[in-house]
Every structure is written in structure tokens, then in C-alpha cells.
Amino acid sequence: MNEAVVLHREAMDMLKQTSRTFFIPINFLEPTLRKTVASAYLCMRAIDEIEDHPSMLAETKRHLLTSISTSLKTTFDPEVYRALIQPYRHILPDVTQRLADWILLCPPEVVGKVKESTGIMAEGMAKWVDQEWKIRTKEDLDDYTYYVAGLVGCMLSDLWKWHDNTETDREKAIAFGRGLQAVNILRNQDEDFERGVRFLPDGWDRDDLFSYAKQNLSMGSDYVKDINNRGITMFCKVPLALANSTLKAMKIGREKISRNEVESIVAELESQH
């Protein structure tokens, strides 16, 4: 079996391990696009694991994230990256250690876009590590959710354009990512609070965050209306539907939706398309 096939298989396995929710919709994409989106997701997940690391010092996070950002914006060198993370290998997950592999997985004609977006994200994450994730205003929340999720929406829009010239609205793309992130924030509120992080602007309560999530998810639904490719439509609609269902579940005190609910939501969407 050649190296490219092995790498592709390992990437899909890693995707399944790191995000089952993302693994479901990615299978609706045609093979080249699937590989590209998998590469992009894993690159971003690699740096996300640094930002979210429970025991790593803030100064180490900042150092790693800014160094990665610089290297992604110039000529990413796998050897330099290996040397950079070497002192922290014992605490970094495989998805982060293998960043060079995820870049290699991406088709050469679009890898520059994936590296650029991941580099901007790493820079934004380093900024918020510096600020200790202190969210004071709605603008702060918008800025944070832009870097960790809105950028994903922008990058996906670039990938749709590259793939088959699909044009989408940038603001709605950002809202698409933001809405999904807001649901994650709601889900992880207790966990975040324990590590001293509160993603709520001053004067906001949980209901305000619910409204913020709903408003952005609604714009996310509008975003999908511009897309005519069935695979891409399904890829976007599945996480939106799961996020909306999770919001409803949390509103009545449940932590998340069940595996069966996930399967029936996906099946229903498939029957509509």
C-alpha cells in the first residue's frame, strides 16, 4: 500500500477519534474535497489541542502558537516543527505531533490556503492565551469565536470556491462557525469555569449565550442556502441540525443529544436531499 493511501487512512482514523460529529458529515463530500477538509480540520485541531491543554503553562502555549503561526505563514519545515514540539511531546496528543502529516495530506494546489488560515488561527489563539480568555464585551466574544471557529467557516468557503466555484457569503460563513462554537461553549461551561475561564461578556447570563448561539446558527442556515452541491450542503446541514438539537436539549437540562438522536437527524436530512 503506498504512503499516500496509508496517510489518508490514518487521517480518517484520527478524525474519527478526535471528533465523531465532524466525521459524520465529512463522508458526504466527494473524495478530493473530503481529503482536503480532513487535512484542514486536523491542522486546526492540532493547534486547538495546544490552546486547550489543561496543564501547559500559558507562556509555553503562546510560544508554541506564535512559532507555529510564523512557520505556517512562511515555509513550514517539518524538521523545525519536530524540534519545536520535542520538549513537550510527552504531553501533546498525536493529532498535534503529526501536524506535518496533515499538511502533507492536503492537495498541493490548495495547501497554501489551509496553512494561511491555520496560521491566522494560531496567532489569534496566542492573543487570547495572553488575555487569559477574559471576555468582557460582546465584541470580545465575537473576536474570540472568530479566531477559533469563524475562521473555519471562511476557510471552508475558500475550499468550496476552489472545488467547484461555489460562492458563499463571508459574514454568514463566520456566523456558521460562531454558532457551532457558541453551542460548544454552552456545553462546556462548567468545565471551563473549573479552569477559571468564563466565556460570558459582563452582564450576560446563560440565556444571553443561548440567544447568541441561535442568532448565529440562523445566519449559518442562510449560509447553506447559497450552496447547490449536495455533498457540501449535507456537510454543512448536519452540524447545524445537531447544534440546534443540542441547544433544545440543553434548554431542558440535558447535557447533549443521544447517539440515536444523531443518527435519526442525519437520516432525516439524507431523505430530504
Image: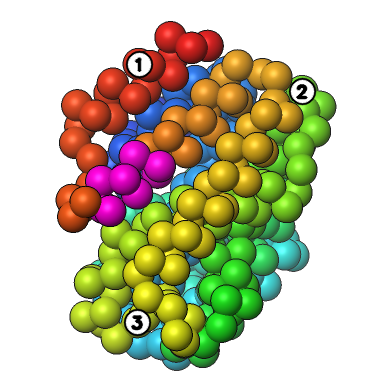
219 part of magenta stretch: no
Range drawn in magenta: 243-251
Q: Residue at x 38, y 33 (%)?
A: 23
Secondary element type, mark 3: loop
Q: On the image, which quarter does residue 231 sit in? A: top right
- Looking at the rendered structure, the kind of residue marked 1 is Ala
Mark 1 sits on what residue?
267
Q: Nearer the viewer, residue 142 or 97?
A: 142
- Measuring from the top left, give residue 114's x and y in whole percent: 66, 49
What secondary structure prevails in the magenta region? helix
- Measuring from the top left, give residue 227's x and y in whole percent: 70, 26
CA gap between label 1 and label 2 equals: 26 Å
State which tag comes first along the sequence, 3 or 2. 2
The tally of labels here is 3
Q: On screen, 131 above or below 97? A: below
CA gap between label 1 and label 3 equals: 37 Å
Q: Residue at x 63, y 77 (%)?
A: 139
| Residue 43 appears in the rendering | no
* Neighbours of disc 1 within 10 Å: few (<14), some (14-19), many (20+): few
- Looking at the rendered structure, the kind of residue marked 3 is Val
Asked if residue 273 lies left or right of residue 87, the reply is: right
- Measuring from the top left, give residue 106's x and y in whole percent: 61, 38
Q: Mark 2 and mark 1 in contact (Cβ < 8 Å)? A: no
Asked if residue 67 lies left or right of residue 172, the reply is: left
* Neighbours of disc 3 within 10 Å: few (<14), some (14-19), many (20+): some
Asked if residue 34 lies left or right of residue 53, the reply is: right
Secondary element type, mark 2: helix
Mark 3 sits on what residue?
197
Mark 2 sits on what residue?
164
